[in-house]
Image (cartoon, grey):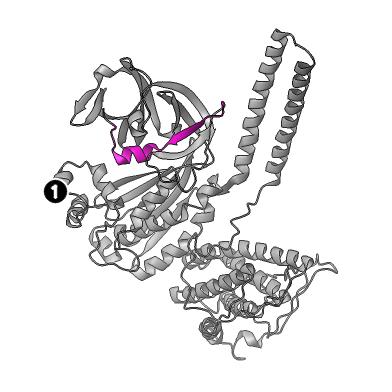
Amino acid sequence: MPPIDCEDQELLEGFLAETTELLEKLDDDLVALEKSSDDAELLNRIFRSIHTVKGASSFLGFDLLVKVTHKTEDVLNRLRKGELHVTPEFMDIILEATDLVKLLVSDIKAGDIQEREIDGTIAKLLPLLSEAPPAQTAEGSSSPSAEVAKVVIPASATENDQVVLPVEAAASEPSPNQEVVPAPPPKASGDMVSKKVPPPPKPAEPKGEDLSDNTTVRVDVKRLDDLMNQVGELVLERNRMIQINQDLQQGEPDRLDFNEEFGKLTKRMSFVTSELQMQVLKMRMLPVDKVFKKFPRIVRSMARDLGKEVDLQIFGEETELDRSVVDEIGDPLIHLIRNAMDHGLETPDVRTAAGKPRCGTLVLSAVHEGNQIIISIKDDGNGIDTDRVGRKAVEKGLVTEEQLAAMSQRELFDLIFLPGFSTKDKASDLSGRGVGMDVVKTNIKKLNGLIEIKSEKGQGSEFILRLPLTLAIIQSLLVDVEGEVYSIPLSSVLESLRVDQRQFHLIGNREILKLRDMVLPLIRLESIFGVKRRNEQDNFCYVVVVGTAEKRMGLVVSRLVGQQEVAIKSLGKYLANIPGIAGSTILGDGRVALIIDPVGLVDGGDTGGR
């Protein structure tokens, strides 16, 4: 790659930013076009996206990128004229061409231009340009090559605007009665050559071929203004703090006045800090659509491979959550979508025989609920056969017959998350290796999230993910365990109560408490974490009831310290995998407090009995 001067580097970055934004939406639009081929507005939007990429890359000298986009634009123009019709085979070719465009743009973005071959994809586009239109006129063919080249200059053009002239006959230029698409102004510079391409690219997955830059976040200017206002308020309170400190240094202040002023300052600082924190969190928020927009293409590809008809419905794509969470949920959602497509939804013939519509429904939705985001993947397929799941688990040696007999329906559902579990007798490209759902649970636990399954045999299944809005700051309950303070995420706390330890019962080596109409297993945190008892305990203690989905467990602690918002700090790679510990935080007095992972404790089933 030749050296790029400062001015050209800025133009190149502008080109990449605009092209990335256009290509990110393109897959979704193309899949939508396949279902709504008569949507002229949608078709024009797709055409404009390809036209814009072609125009900018032509100015910059990205020759092979121009060739691919130019041929794709020619085909789309014939589609706009009604000379071609949308079919699955037609859309396969267009999607392959856009995948190649993404690949070439990725090379440019990485600054590592590889030799890629584009002839195979162009060879698939050429027949679409040479086919005779449905109706021939007496004068002859209406082939695009017979059109007259035109140069279209927008009325608002200035002397600095650039006009891109097509190298070949203007097959892609609109006819007089069609929409005029002006060529974009130049945004970059540099000569780059693309060469060899692999077999037809697979649909882009959330973490695979995402062209977006994960090191940057686009922020609304209003949010920046709000942030600046809060920083201004913080500066005022800092100045007030400096003044109080100077008064204190110059002489003994009036104790009553000092306490009153310091109390006011503390309240104002707390308010301003909370507002500042909220503004910063909002700046980190991204719509979950960043991940959701990949799935129409993926579902389409899988449906064709599996011979199934699927209607994907997406709701709540505008729901926002922290970018750190957005970056991590792609893989779990991919596995859940694959699971629903392969195991859940039936083929059209099977659905028809069962009295269902030939086309299955897959619903992906997101919604805010308190300080969590709830993501649901729901299908109307055949549901989970718990009998079959149980038999497979026993066959694979994951559980015994005795364990299986004692399991609840929830515990039977959870078997599908065990490493190595699969109901498939033979592995395929999509499933059968027993790793997909294990990956889902592992990744959701890393996000301090929960996963819940609802299913009815023959009616369908729903996988519900409960994720924190951010991984940086959480609301927590601070508890004291023999002088050591621990933090329990408030999202997992159901209730807390003071009880007499003489109400505890011992069943085998497990302590339990009868709480209303349920038997609550207990965990003594001092036993789990090896905290030394300072003195003989009295009969009374506190039990914090935590829950994950349908599971409940009581954490036995010495006393409750109170609720507090805490910043999560990493323990580092050497201490990252301690069971039951999610991280650490620093308290107001400078002490370090460990953050408990209730999901790990509950799933581990460790009782810490006496």
Total labels drawn: 1
Looking at the rendered image, the quarter that the C terminus falls into is top left
Whole-percent x, y for residue 571 in the image: 49, 42
Tell me: 349 left or right of 77: left
Residue 317 visible in the current orientation: no
Residue 151 against residue 294 in the figure, above or below: below
Answer left or right for 422 relative to 377: left
Question: Which residue: 71% across, 63% down?
Answer: 14
- Residue 593 part of the magenta segment: yes
Picture coordinates of residue 148 (x, y %)?
A: 71, 85
**Quarter of image, res 104:** bottom right
- Dividing the picture into quarters, in which one does residue 550 lie? top left
Quarter of the figure with residue 419: bottom left
Instruction: Tell which of 198 and 55 is nearer to you.
Output: 198
Q: Secondary structure at mark 1?
A: helix
| Other-residue count near label 1 (Cα within 10 Å), few / some / many at <14 / 14–19 / ≥20 | few
Where are the magenta residues, as a range?
Answer: 589-608
Does residue 420 sit above or below 593 in this rendering? Answer: below
Closer to the camera in the image, 67 or 594? 594
Residue labelled with disc 1: 401
Identity of the amino acid at label 1? Glu
